[in-house]
Amino acid sequence: MVRSSASRPDHLIHFNKDLVMPEEKTTPNGKKLVYLRGKTPAPHKFETDPTFGYSADELLTVTAPKAPPDFDEFWQQTYAENMAVPVDYEIKEVESWIPGYKISEIYYRSWNNFRTGGYLVVPEEGEINTTVVFGHGYPRPGIERINPELDLPLKNAAILFVHGRGFGLSPHPECPHNDSMLHFTVGIKSKETRIIRGCVAQLWGAASVMLDIYPQTEGNLIYAGGSFGGALGALMLPWEKRYTKAYLNVPAFGNYPLAKTFEGSISAEWLRKSYERIPNLAEILSYYDTAIAASRITCPVVCSPALADPKVPPPTQFAVANALNRESELYVLPAGHYEYEGIAVVKAKLNKYLDEFFNG
């Protein structure tokens, strides 16, 4: 069935401005669940309903699809191959554009001997007792440089902002530079060659680099990523036990069979056309389904899926969130990938919870 805004005739939902207190509940499988501004999505001006016809309660029923029989074996083998590659990292300090922090370009090797680049951001003062690896989202069209973002409540932390293959300081010979639309398709005709495989491996290499530079942070290595970065985190974490906590914000690539059914979504339309063009695409994508991977994550995770999102349909985000272990916590946003009235209040409330999670 293809779901669209037609299934919700009142798709321009009005925000209840009086509903400002977080609403705390428990998910059907026992996870902590907090609606940061109630169960009402933020209002929008899009032609298509960014809830894709799902209510807050319906989102909690979305599950992961069935995993291919060798899903674990495929990723465990990829992890082993990556760990056999010496990281051989190089650090070059550059002029900082963030007050109070030193910034360096950092380069290291990962799976298939690919040269990964990114930014290492370190406080000018204080001891480092936490290391964080950050995965970025797909950049906006026309962007030339992917800068670090310091909007998370991290204390005494060194942060490595990894640039995915094909982006920023990690140019890829088969991928137009910083092209989010084409990036998804690179190597997609085989599970072995898909560029996402290498992007996941970069995050394992990042763990090796950070723990080598800051060995005192072993046991306190955190992963954080949103959208595309959230997807990479979900695919990466089950096989890498050195990460002890993770934050996944509006994670992408969940439940591909469901994702292709949504009308009004550019990604869903692309998926439907690709299914026609590539006969075994369903099998290939099943190895990169973040909802399947999320069910295998063992460390505590904070996940913030959105009730409304025009770019990453909320049901696909909740497929990931719902699959996480019971030690994980869900902090539900009114919307993702667009601005709305009250967003600063929501971010402040989320950061309050994240402060306790990261630094508690």
Image (cartoon, grey):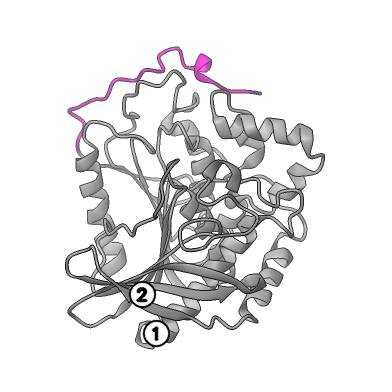
Side of 83 relative to 241 (left or right): right
102 up-or-down from 84: above or below: above
- Identity, as a three-letter code, of the amino acid under mark 2: Thr
Does the stretch in magenta take in 8?
yes
> How busy is the neighbourhood of tag 2: few (under 14 within 10 Å), some, or many (20 plus)?
many
Residue 161, position as x, y percentages in the image: 40, 64
Q: Nearer the viewer, residue 47 or 256?
A: 47
> Which quarter shows the N terminus?
top right
Give the quadrant of residue 340. top left
Q: Quadrant of residue 72?
A: bottom right
Give me the disc on residue 308: none
Residue 353 image point, x, y percent: 26, 56
> What stretch of residues is rendered in magenta?
1-20
Seen in the picture, residue 188 relative to 102 is either above or below; the reply is: above
Question: Dot 1: what SS?
Answer: helix
Mark 2 lies on a secondary structure that is strand
Q: Give the x, y percent position of residue 172.
A: 59, 59
Give the mark, 1 or 2, whose residue is nearer the N terminus: 2
Q: Is residue 276 left or right of residue 308?
A: right
The residue that appears at 63% across and 80% down in the rendered structure is 85
- The residue at which mark 1 appears reads as 213
Between 299 and 160, which is closer to the camera in this rendering?
Answer: 160
Residue at left offset 20%, top offset 77%: 124
- Is residue 360 visible to the viewer in this orientation of the structure? no
Residue 131: mark? 2
Q: Confirm whether the magenta stretch covers residue 239.
A: no
Do the residues bearing badges 1 and 2 touch, measured as CB atoms within 8 Å? yes
User: Badge 1: how crowded within 10 Å, few (<14), some, or many (20+)?
Assistant: few
